[in-house]
Image (tube, helix red, strand yellow):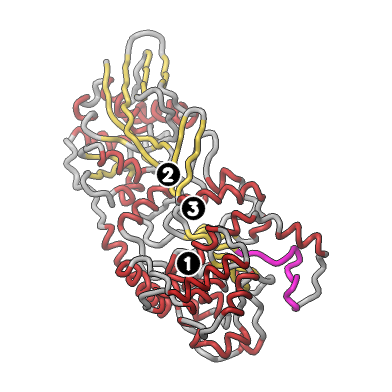
Amino acid sequence: MYAITTTATHHGVDSFLISVEARLSSGLPKFLIVGLPDAAVREGVERVRAALRDTFGEFHNGPCIVNLSPASRRKAGSAFDLAMAMAIAAAMGKVEPEAVAAAVFVGELGLDGSLKSAAGTLPATIAAARAGRARIIVPTASAREASVIAGIDVLAAASFADALRLVREGYRDTPVRTDPEALLANAAIEEGLDLADVRGLYQPKRALELAAAGNHHTLFYGPPGAGKTMLARRLAPLLPALSVGEAIETTAIHSIAGLIADTSLMVRRPFRAPHHTTSGAGLVGGGSFPSPGEISLAHNGVLFLDELPEFVPSVLNQLREPLEDKHLTISRAGARLTFPAAFLLVAAMNPCPCGYHGTGMRECRCNDGVVARYQGRLSGPLLDRIDLHVEVPCIDVEELRSSRQEEGSATVRQRIASAREHRLRFGPLPLSAGAADRLALAARKFAMSTRAIERSTAVARTVAHLAGATEVSAAHLDEALQFRSTRERDHACALSLAGPSGREGEHDARDRAGRGRAV
């Protein structure tokens, strides 16, 4: 007695189909799963046995061997339960083997035969659709998540008995359908995170605008309570809305991580803020059976690292390659996995352990050695990959009590959208002769690395796109250089022959008195 059906498993953030073969024979009772199953798969023996007995009142009284093919690849998770139970039911003669072979089955069984959602339902559906399969049976709780994929029928089952009914009736139930474009169109901007709530801090808010318009990594630097975290949390709502492809890709990663609940699609860009005690595997991914880390969970969104120097330096340095390559490759003895990591980094730090070195607010309790060791926890190559370095000063009480209406996020989003459209239309803008000379002089005097030159040029182009210009002027470059190191900022100010460019000019008088300075 033999039957075969199909399920799916995951390899990193990708899924692939697995053939589930069941063979029943005579002899002493034994239930064995082969094909490199992990503990969660092996423990499915009791869940499957209980579900079959609850449904049929009996279980095969002899050897039952289940093979998961290809046997050379590791299998993990509890989503194999439904497929194993269905293959065994077909081998027992309770349902036609051809019927169970005509679908993909994904789901975890309860001891009472109920079907529970399992991590990775969406990528499993993607794998089934890519393989040309006609239908997939998933738990009712996961049906909305799977139904955003076109080209495959998604059928929901609340229990093993319900799935068995679908098979016996020829899969005649109406498939679950969800329109991802409609979901994204109806997604509202996240409320409560508006730039209008931020008083003063014009230069940090300008940095947020540049970061969102040009995908520039940003570091906020300042005393405790100045507003660094408040600013960082307002970056994701400034970014453009997710496309359908981005939304499905982001949802699939979170689905594999088991972070999707009561939703069919992530309609907002993710914002991840891991604690500074996070391990290297937790931040970039990995483990004995590699799973996505925080940088992959922040894919297509924002990764916020608060208290940046408190992270273990070796953990932070693992970000260097993903910041450049937008992906991370992890090699293990039995596998080589690539995780997506196209995130926008925004970090925050204090100037010293007590937080008040050089601020003039309070007396700093840290000596020069303590300050040097604290700041030295951040490697030069990592800082060189961060485009915008911005000081966030504490504003005075008069500014906080001011009744002046601050610019809201809606207005800033419109400028960002216009700048992105301008970039798509004109591409990389050329540097004017004055800007090229200014950049060459700054690079020679302060020994800027090739990466620093490229980053400064990229920021200058974003400034120009926001201004609607067709070339990068010296004034645009001056503003970009202000966001590099302290020496580069001071040099840019000394060289500046033209006034402030872009949005700065509108706030020039009060900015000089109250806005943050680049560091």
Please state which amino acid type lies under the numbered disc 2. Ile
The x and y percentages for residue 329 are: 47, 41
Q: Secondary structure at mark 2?
A: helix
Q: Secondary structure at mark 1?
A: helix
Residue at position x 32%, y 21% in the image: 22
- Asked if residue 243 shows in the view, the reply is yes
Separation (CA) of disc 3 from disc 1: 16 Å
Start-end of magenta stretch: 348-360
The x and y percentages for residue 77 are: 44, 35
Instruction: Give me the disc on residue 256.
Output: 2
Specify which label sits upstream in the sequence, 3 or 1. 3
Whether 125 is drawn above or below 474: the answer is: above
Q: Which residue is mark 3?
A: 324
Asked if the magenta segment contains residue 389, the reply would be no
- Asked if residue 229 shows in the view, the reply is no
The quarter of the picture where residue 5 lies is top left
Specify which label sits upstream in the sequence, 2 or 3. 2
Taking depth in this image into account, of 321 and 487 the one nearest to the observer is 487
The x and y percentages for residue 141 are: 36, 48
Of discs 3 and 1, which sits in the foreground?
1
Residue at position x 39%, y 69% in the image: 430
